[in-house]
Image (cartoon, grey):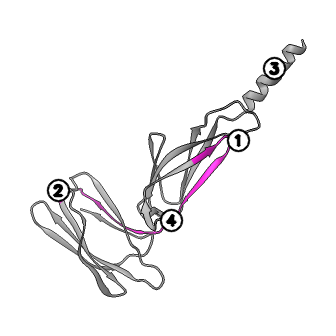
Amino acid sequence: MRGYVLIVAIALILMGCESSGDLRINNRTSHNVYFTVNGSDYTVEGGQSKSVELDVDRDWQIFETNSKQYSLDLEGETYKIWDSYNGMYINHTDVDIENGKTLDVYAIPNLACIKIVNNGDLDIARVACDKYINGNMDHPNLVLTNTAIEPGSTWYLQIEGAYTGREIAYVFYVTFADGARMEYPLMILDVDEMFLLEL
């Protein structure tokens, strides 16, 4: 009888051990954030959060905190991961998920965005801009994409947004496959603002 009780007690302890943890993406921007983890793609709308349960391998050591590393691709329409060590924006990082715990990741806006929805019949062949910083031309005719934006598709690109003491303004140019070009007047885009074109 004592042996039976001991087996039941050990089974209950092992059943109580967690074998998964959660990754929660908290979107603090006003626009979509996209992430990929463990082979699945997710979209988190502006101001929302999304949790994903991820397996963590057990090692059967009851008093040890287990964790597993996952590859995380994360970017938003007005957000990219800033790698302060290398001084650059990146789309990928690794995260450690611990048994029974939630890892919170916050996407806080740090860029502006241009987004084009091509509802027309022609490819958009090129998107370019003139960029101004504090009223001075910084980049004339800066090509944002030469890759065709096909009918029925959506394209976006994060761009530098204005913030206190640094005014960023753009004139955008959209060129269609037949050579027609549209020009959009000078506009200031703050961090977390989007210039949306539905053509």
> Element under label 1?
loop
Circle 2 or circle 3, nearest the eye: 3
> Element under label 3?
helix
Q: Any magenta on residue 120?
A: yes
Q: Is residue 92 above or below residue 12?
A: below
Query: Which residue is at 75% across, 33% downward?
Result: 62
**Nearer the N terminus, badge 1 or badge 2?**
1
In the rendered image, the quadrant that contains the C terminus is bottom left
Q: Residue tagged by mark 3?
A: 8
> Element under label 2?
loop
Q: Residue tagged by mark 4?
A: 85
Circle 4 or circle 3, nearest the eye: 4
Q: Any magenta on residue 36?
A: no
From this viewpoint, which residue is outermost toward the front? Answer: 86
Q: Amino acid at mark 1?
A: Thr
Question: Which region shows up in magenta?
Answer: 96-124
Image location of residue 192, percent across then percent down: 45, 69
Mark 3 is surrounded, within 10 Å at the Cα level, by few (under 14), some (14 to 19) or many (20 or more) other residues, namely few
**Nearer the N terminus, badge 1 or badge 3?**
3
Q: Amino acid at mark 2?
A: Asp
Q: Residue tagged by mark 2?
A: 123
Q: Quadrant of residue 8?
A: top right
Circle 1 or circle 3, nearest the eye: 1
**Nearer the N terminus, badge 4 or badge 2?**
4
Q: Amino acid at mark 4?
A: Tyr
Query: Which residue is at 47% across, 69% downward?
Result: 110
The disc label shown at residue 65, or none: 1
